[in-house]
Image (cartoon, rainbow, N blue to C red):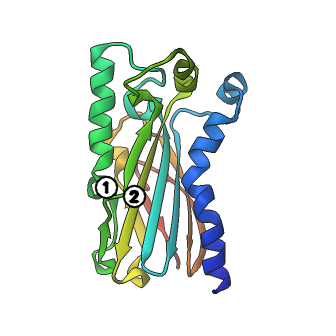
Amino acid sequence: MTKMTTLILLLMPMITFAGKKRHHHHDHKKRHHHAHSHGSSELNLATDKYKLKIVMTIPGFDIVGFEHTPKTKAQKNSVKQAISVLKNAPKNIELPKSSICTVSKDSSVETEMDHHDHHSHNHKKSEHAEFKITYHYICKNITALTSVTVNVFSHFKNMQTMKAQGITKDGQFTQSLNKKSNVFKLGK
């Protein structure tokens, strides 16, 4: 196993569960002032051989305009509509056609805002709710994956910036994305 493959395999669980771990193990009052920021989202990307995984963590405010458990019918509909948009990977993430990537069925959208069985302990969890979007791809020509265009900005007006981080066989990449600069470059 190569060093890069080992690194990717070690980081994949952290990327997969980063949103949940950060969200469930913090003090909401402290997070509100330090780690939590409206308009600032994260994208983590990793490749391994022919597989691509993209995980986006986006504050609820940036998606639907609030972060609490939806109370009104309009808020509940906003959450359902947002989930529908976010489930459509090709609408939100554009990959080079030459990479020949297909999104797999195990992609998902998770949020504390969409629980149908709200017990009293769930209300605290949803105080600063986020959307966690995970897209899995199988790519026939992953070497052609030189960039990722993030179109999610165009669907949600409150989104301002996104910190993108990626690990591929070519190295590690970090870039700040926004509405005007939404192409995450993976390489030269």
Circle 2 packing at 10 Å, graded few (<14), some (14-19), many (20+), is many
As drawn, 160 above or below 173: above
Instruction: Choose top left, top right, bottom left or bottom right for residue 19.
Output: top right
> Which residue is tagged 2?
135
Q: Position of residue 146 (x, y in %)?
A: 43, 76
* Total numbered labels placed on residues in the image: 2
Q: Position of residue 89 (x, y in %)?
A: 31, 55
Residue 43 numbered mark, or none = none
State the quadrant of the N terminus.
bottom right
Write the residue at 33% across / 29% down. Answer: 79
Q: Earlier in the sequence, mark 2 or mark 1?
A: 1
As drawn, 164 above or below 142: above
Q: Position of residue 176 (x, y in %)?
A: 55, 54
> Which residue is tagged 1?
89
User: Looking at the image, which is closer to me, 180 or 175?
Assistant: 175
In the picture provided, is 3 more to the left or to the right than 74?
Answer: right
- Amino acid residing under circle 2: Tyr
In the picture provided, is 73 more to the left or to the right than 31?
Answer: left
